[in-house]
Image: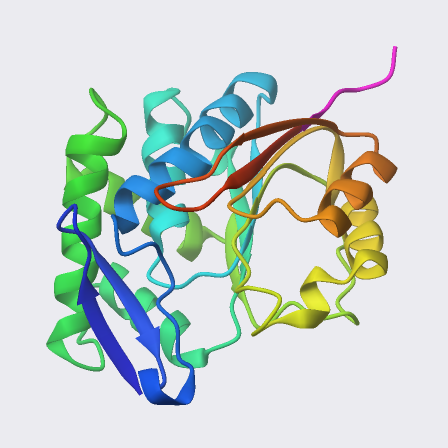
Amino acid sequence: MFTFIQTKDGSPTLRIGRPEDGGEPMHSLEGALSETRYIYGDALLKASEIEARPRVLSVGLGLGYVEILAAACFLKAGLSAAECGGVTYELIDALRDNFVNWLRDKPTQDAAFKQAYDTILEGTANVSVPGTSPPDEIKTFLRSMIEGGSWRLEGPLSVSTKIEEPFGCICFDAFSSKTSPDLWNEEFLKTFLTQASGERCVLSTYACTGTLKRALIHAEYALTIRAGFANKRDSTFAVKHAQP
């Protein structure tokens, strides 16, 4: 069951399941777009600066906020769709299918998905990355990455997933430890970060747990603990540099 919610900055988020069954919204109700911009915007822009061919690992597609923002950042950096890309892991087939259908201008499961994606695209172009390309160009760029294979939409990330390539940017937007406990386990995070991190890599996430910080230090990241978005206490921004 999908429930669309308009957050305080006018952008949509999604609740999966009924509130009475413990379903939680994917973003802060203070502003889904604002939260995405705050948590992941700097990481995506930095990835474009430190790598000639930036590759992004996104954990959790949701409504495609990170993917749309990444396309806007890559366009702003003057990259082509063949010069950048990434991989997104998403548990729910319907979220992947609806997103791809929207990119290809095909019908989505219901009109609410198309409206949500259009709102996110417009907000990203006009608010998140000022001075970037028009919405249609961002959408075309992202579609070109996905159809050209430089950005792949995969199934769920799990403890058995083998990351076969290093990335220059990791946007870790997995649901909370309550809903996705395996993805927040310290041993999993250590293995995941070892496999996924390039020699130079930037990671950002809304979370700031002890297990996450220990795993990042184990993977040779330098941590910056930032204020969380809205009513969240802290968030994590971490950078790994190539050893001299």
Name the residue at 20% across, 35% down: 125
Q: Is residue 215 visible?
A: yes
Q: Is residue 81 visible?
A: no
The x, y position of residue 216, in whole percent, is 77, 39
Judged left or right of residue 82, residue 27 is left
Name the residue at 39% across, 40% down: 229
In the image shown, does 175 or 167 lie closer to the viewer?
A: 175
The x, y position of residue 71, in whole percent, is 36, 39
Q: Quadrant of residue 238?
A: top right
Name the residue at 38% across, 63% down: 26
In the image shown, does 38 or 194 lie closer to the viewer?
A: 38
- Vertical side of 160 occupied by 231: above or below: above
As for residue 235 lying within the magenta part, the answer is: no
Judged left or right of residue 186, residue 31 is left
- Where are the magenta residues, as a range? 239-244
Locate the N terminus and report the quarter of the image it occupies: bottom left
Judged left or right of residue 172, residue 62 is left
In the image shown, does 5 or 197 lie closer to the viewer?
A: 5
- Vertical side of 148 occupied by 24: above or below: below
Q: Residue furthest top?
A: 244
- Vertical side of 53 occupied by 203: above or below: below
The x, y position of residue 87, in whole percent, is 56, 53
- Vertical side of 205 occupied by 224: above or below: above
